[in-house]
Amino acid sequence: MNFYDNAEEVRQAAIILYENAHYRMSIYNSCLSIELYLKSKLYLMENGDDYVYTHDTVNMYQLLTKRFKFDKDIFSIIKTCRKYFNESRYPHAGTEVYTKEFAKEFLGNVESVKSFIDNDCVADITDLENKG
């Protein structure tokens, strides 16, 4: 399974968890799907392989935005995702922050990142030539 397909599957899991009121785990899966969407385009970047086995979404996004531009800056989404990736998985200070509204915000964040990957991180002729 490639990163993009994996991201799609994890996104669906986040939706199912949300629909079943498992908001903390929905947030965690939303963050994981964001990471996987970013990883799905790292092969287009020089040094992209440096981040494939990390959870460093901030640097993945910064690497991708050196080449690809998005109409809307989603860096705040990436930073929030990075923060809650671990905090939702290993909550230390309680779980009251993991509300339905907060989880819904994360599902929207996933859609923003997916849009960036689907519409703005597009291979061009140079990528095809380099692959051959």
Image (spheres, helix red, strand yellow):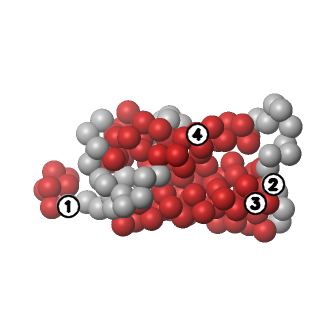
Q: Which mark is residue 124?
A: 1
Q: Residue 106: x percent and y percent?
A: 64, 56
Q: Residue 58 carries which label?
A: none
Give the residue drawn at x 58%, y 39%.
Answer: 82
Q: Residue 86: x percent and y percent?
A: 67, 36
Q: Is mark 1 on a helix, strand or loop?
A: loop
Circle nearer the viewer, 4 or 3? 3
Lower position in the chain sequence, tag 4 or tag 2:
4
Q: Is mark 2 on a helix, strand or loop?
A: loop
At label 4, the amino acid type is Arg
Figure quadrant of the C terminus: bottom left
Residue denoted by label 3: 101
Q: What element carries label 3?
A: helix
Q: Which mark is residue 82?
A: 4
**Is the Cβ of the residue at disc 4 closer than 8 Å to that at disc 2?**
no
Q: What element carries label 4?
A: helix
Q: Residues within 10 Å of mark 4 (few under 14, many from 20)?
A: some
User: In the shown orientation, is residue 119 left or right of residue 5?
Assistant: left
